[in-house]
């Protein structure tokens, strides 16, 4: 009976709130896509897609390694008694990453001046940097809340974020500039407003019992472990971000703005749908895996995560194969809906990539995330080579085929890298 009651409590306190957060995030993401693709032409939408891709590269490649380190190390900090010094140390990291992004932006703006780029290029770089910085900060806050298993706050943040960005984009479009530049600016302003409000409202939660003055050799040793883990995560996350986001820039120069706009629209749908499923299982399972020392318990949780995730992706791919065209007409435009075959392949590819990321929890438990950089290199090398050699004649559909092939190779690479590790989630606590 006690096991049954614990299961009901887990359902009420964890599963339901994680599901609410993911469903509302998906809803506002899909609604935004429908609005944007109906307000803009495919070529205009490609500008918004390039801005979102570059900003996503910043926060997933530069900030997400820190956020993943927070998620992994906060339970350790709690168990080892240095959680009060955890937040100040993370703030130091945030400042350093901010300087890195500013330096990168300065280089890009200097390139724009020397190359004689148009004003739209400078706007794109500036907006991307703002979005990347603030979105990285937002996900850092989410990582703290997830590590503390505060599911209600996470669900509220996920819901409000998408709503404010959509409202910001529509307001800018109708009140200031009925162009792709207006929508891109509105998306960023809405996101910035959300992050500021979130930090104001959650300041007491974030800074409660925080000690900004603690020092000492033992604390510095633990912080050194944090830094080492971050560096290991940085390698793999930067490669992952490059594959999942900079592909839009590569394809822009290969297939042009109009074709990229259509590809980006169906890609955004595919990545949104698969990411909601992935993050549902990650948010639900990873904190449980990291908090428990029992290797048998960790293994059982991982098996359940992978099994249910794979089943969920298989259902989505099947539905897309039969009803993808009608769904795209409803969500975008008839012109974009012509890419329904590309849409199905992109769902499969994104689903495979996230499956590989789930399997990587073994390296996260062992604090060896850097072991997976060869898998990301395989993914990137196959996809880039495929695009440069074959995409020119076949467009987005051929690119999506290459993505599926690269994603499959990625999962196989992760599997063999896991086989080559000493110990496992099951054997090593």
Image: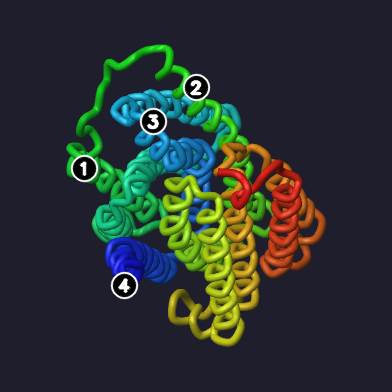
Task: Using the image, determine if residue 325 lies above or below residue 427.
Answer: below
In this view, the residue in front, 295 or 84, is 295
Give the mark, 1 or 3, whose residue is nearer the N terminus.
Answer: 3
Assess whether mark 4 and mark 3 are in contact (beta carbons under 8 angstroms). Answer: no
**Furthest residue in direction right, as rendered:** 389
Q: Nearer the viewer, mark 2 or mark 1?
A: 2
Give the mark, 3 or 4, whose residue is nearer the N terminus.
Answer: 4
Give the mark, 2 or 1, whose residue is nearer the N terminus.
Answer: 1
| Residue for badge 3 | 80
Tell me if mark 3 has few (under 14), some (14-19) or many (20+) residues whose alpha carbon lies within 10 angstroms of its own: few
Residue 125 appears anywhere in the view:
no
Q: In whole angstroms, how far apart are the C-alphas of marks 2 and 1?
A: 28 Å
| Residue for badge 1 | 202
At mark 1, the secondary structure is: loop
Assess whether mark 1 and mark 2 are in contact (beta carbons under 8 angstroms). Answer: no
Task: Using the image, determine if residue 314 lies above or below residue 171.
Answer: below
Give the mark, 1 or 4, whose residue is nearer the N terminus.
Answer: 4
Q: Residue at x 42, y 56 (%)?
A: 283
In this rendering, would 344 be left or right of 230? right
Q: Nearer the viewer, mark 1 or mark 4?
A: 4
At mark 3, the secondary structure is: helix
Q: Residue at x 57, y 69 (%)?
A: 307
Q: Residue 218 occupies which quadrant of the picture? A: top left
| Residue for badge 2 | 224
The percent position of residue 40, horizontal first and vertical second, equals 43, 65
Assess whether mark 2 and mark 4 are in contact (beta carbons under 8 angstroms). Answer: no
Q: In whole angstroms, how far apart are the C-alphas of marks 4 and 2?
A: 44 Å
Residue 1: mark:
4
In this view, the residue in front, 77 or 120, is 77
Assess whether mark 2 and mark 3 are in contact (beta carbons under 8 angstroms). Answer: no
Which quadrant is the C terminus positioned in?
top right
Q: Residue 21 occupies which quadrant of the picture? A: bottom left
């Amino acid at each position: 009976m006690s096991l049954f009651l614990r299961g009901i409590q887990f359902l009420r306190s964890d599963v339901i709130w994680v599901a609410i957060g993911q469903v509302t995030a998906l809803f506002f993401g899909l609604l935004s896509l429908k609005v944007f693709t109906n307000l803009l032409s495919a070529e205009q939408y490609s500008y918004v897609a390039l801005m979102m891709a570059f900003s996503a590269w910043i926060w997933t490649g530069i900030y997400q390694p820190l956020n993943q380190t927070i998620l992994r190390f906060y339970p350790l900090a709690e168990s080892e008694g240095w959680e009060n010094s955890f937040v100040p140390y993370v703030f130091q990291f945030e400042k350093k990453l901010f300087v890195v992004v500013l330096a990168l932006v300065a280089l890009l703006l200097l390139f724009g001046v020397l190359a004689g780029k148009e004003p739209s290029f400078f706007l794109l770089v500036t907006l991307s940097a703002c979005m990347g910085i603030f979105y990285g900060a937002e996900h850092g806050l989410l990582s703290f809340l997830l590590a503390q298993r505060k599911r209600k706050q996470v669900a509220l943040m996920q819901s409000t974020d998408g709503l404010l960005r959509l409202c910001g984009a529509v307001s800018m479009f109708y009140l200031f500039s009925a162009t792709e530049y207006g929508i891109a600016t509105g998306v960023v302003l809405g996101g910035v407003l959300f992050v500021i409000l979130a930090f104001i409202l959650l300041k007491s939660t974030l800074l409660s019992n925080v000690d900004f003055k603690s020092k000492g050799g033992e604390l510095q040793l633990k912080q050194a472990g944090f830094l080492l883990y971050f560096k290991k995560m940085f390698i793999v996350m930067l490669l992952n971000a490059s594959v999942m986001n900079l592909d839009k820039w590569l394809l822009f120069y290969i297939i042009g703005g109009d074709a990229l706009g259509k590809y980006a629209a169906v890609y955004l749908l595919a990545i949104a749908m698969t990411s909601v499923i992935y993050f549902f299982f990650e948010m639900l399972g990873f904190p449980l895996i990291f908090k428990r020392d029992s290797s048998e318990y960790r293994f059982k949780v991982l098996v359940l995560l992978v099994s249910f995730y794979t089943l969920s992706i298989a259902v989505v791919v099947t539905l897309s194969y039969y009803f993808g065209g009608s769904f795209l007409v409803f969500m975008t435009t008839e012109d974009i809906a012509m890419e329904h075959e590309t849409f199905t392949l992109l769902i499969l590819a994104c689903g495979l990539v996230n499956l590989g990321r789930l399997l990587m929890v073994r390296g996260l438990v062992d604090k060896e995330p850097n072991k997976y950089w060869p898998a990301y290199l395989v993914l990137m090398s196959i996809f880039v080579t495929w695009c440069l050699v074959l995409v020119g004649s076949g467009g987005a559909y051929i690119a999506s085929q290459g993505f599926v092939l690269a994603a499959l190779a990625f999962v196989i690479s992760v599997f063999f890298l896991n086989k080559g590790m000493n110990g496992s989630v099951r054997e090593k606590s």
